[in-house]
Amino acid sequence: MRRLLTIVEGDGDVRAVPILIRRTLEKNGIFDVGLLPTQRRGEYPSVKKNFDDYFVAATKENPPTYGLDFDSKGYDCPYREAALLLDRAQALRPNWPLKIAFLMKEYEALFLHDEQATRIVFPDIPKQVEFPKSPHEIRGAKEWISGKRPKGMAYKETVHQAKITAHLNLDLLHERSRDFAHIERAVLQLIDTPIPA
């Protein structure tokens, strides 16, 4: 069986990202990929500082490695940051299968693309509330969701992130979210890339 190791930022991601990856694989008719326990490595500045150690440790698990949702706040070009990390990985382990997918703002922006999935988990969001037309431009999707719920009923990453992820319409996201389309492409490419001998 093929295996995949995911590396994420926060506690909510540890539960939600494997759900997103499994559902993405199933959507594409792939059922022979095992996911190793997700590694939480914190926000991007810490990841960048300690990347060499994190990457080498990940390769000892001997699967392709996938990084997702490192906070890109304070960095003007997430794509350039990803390229720098990929160069560092190449120097450490030439040709090792690695993909890095930075969400332009944050994971919860995916929820703003899929109003129906978000309302399934949060039926208390008033029907008259209009969801953003350009969710990828919002910083503070968590706060946006919390602000639309009744007072005292905030969005909680560790409680709600996995629940909404389980309801996401991935075909819809593929059409609406460049971030999700990138995630999907990266996963599909990664699982078919052989590990160097």
Image (cartoon, rainbow, N blue to C red):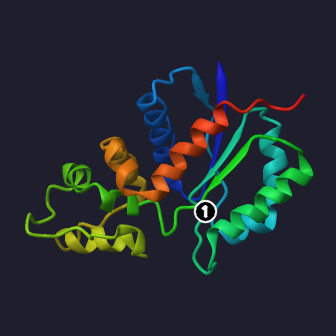
Picture quadrant of residue 108: bottom left
Three-letter code, disc 1: Phe
184 vs 13: above or below: above
13 vs 197: above or below: below
For the residue carrying disc 1, how many other residues have a C-alpha within 10 Å: few (<14), some (14-19), or many (20+)? many
Picture quadrant of residue 150: bottom left
- Residue 52: x %, y % from top left: 85, 57
Residue behind mark 1: 70
Picture quadrant of residue 86: bottom right
- Secondary structure under tag 1 reads loop
- Residue 15: x %, y % from top left: 48, 45
- Residue 48: x %, y % from top left: 75, 66
Q: Nearer the viewer, residue 27 or 161?
A: 27
Query: Which quadrant holds the C terminus?
Result: top right
Q: Nearer the viewer, residue 152 or 77?
A: 77
Q: Is residue 14 visible?
A: no
Return the residue found at the far front.
Answer: 175
Q: Is residue 132 left or right of residue 102?
A: left
Q: Residue at x 65, y 66 (%)?
A: 79
Q: Nearer the viewer, residue 171 or 69?
A: 171
Q: Is residue 147 visible?
A: yes
- Residue 55: x %, y % from top left: 80, 50
Q: Is residue 84 left or right of residue 158?
A: right
Query: Which quadrant holds the N terminus?
Result: top right
Q: Residue at x 62, y 80 (%)?
A: 76
Q: Residue at x 70, y 42 (%)?
A: 65
